[in-house]
Image (cartoon, grey):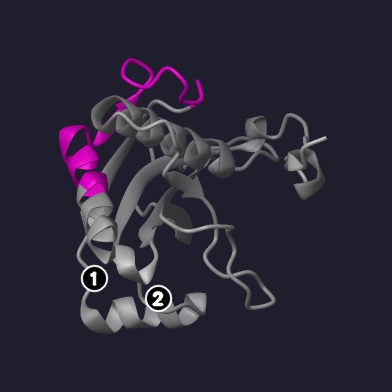
Amino acid sequence: MIYETLACITEEINKHFSRQLHINEEKVVLSGIINQDGTVAIQGENKVLVTLINIEKEALGKVGAGRFSGNTMPPVCINLYILFSAYFSSNNYPEALRFISFIIAYFQSGSVLTQANTPSLDSRIDKLTFEMESMGTEKMNNIWATLGAKYMPSVVYKMRMLTFDESIIKEYRPIVRASSADNTPL
């Protein structure tokens, strides 16, 4: 459910940018920043990366979340902390700042996603709300150090809230990625 939610948000922002900026290229990519081996996680530059940096249990939960019967645990409600970082070439720093501004403007124009305004949102999700997190210099430094990357223009949003219970486990379908051989002209 986390992957599907973040993929939906990434797709929605790309659609918005396509409409507003009249660009065909997908500028927003769901990706880590650095691979486990220390290499850069994405190919190319000039993208906004969407990266999950923390998962937090919602303290309040939903009404009735404390009630359960038999061997079934109550659903758990979580918040996701999402880092939007502008991975642009060094000579393209002004564009990096512009795209971070576009991300902020996107969430200011609509900080709540529902089935009504986001049809591609998973039907099990009532709504998602986004709040910009104010990170101090020290906390941002810790985030970037933990990620193993150099600082990039970025903003963190707290996304409330996903509800998990056993019904989310339906089937496992591995994500299929195109190989570099698929892009080779014949």
Give the mark, 2 or 1, whose residue is nearer the N terminus.
1
- Identify the secondary structure beneath mark 2: helix
* 58 over 73 or under it: above or below: below
- Left or right of 179 on screen, residue 98: left
Residue marked by disc 2: 143
Question: Which is more toward the observer, 165 or 17?
Answer: 17
Identify the amino acid type marked 1: Met
Magenta region: 102-124
Residue shown at 22%/61% (left/top)? 94
- Left or right of 44 on screen, residue 94: left
Could you classify mark 2 by the number of other residues whose Cα lies within 10 Å: few (under 14), some (14-19), or many (20 or more)? some
Residue shown at 76%/48% (left/top)? 180
Marks 2 & 1, CB-CB < 8 Å contact: yes
Identify the amino acid type marked 2: Ile
Tell me, for residue 135, which label it has, or none.
Answer: 1
Quadrant where the N terminus is found in the figure: top right
Which picture quadrant has residue 153? bottom left
Q: Is residue 119 magenta?
A: yes
* 102 over 45 or under it: above or below: above
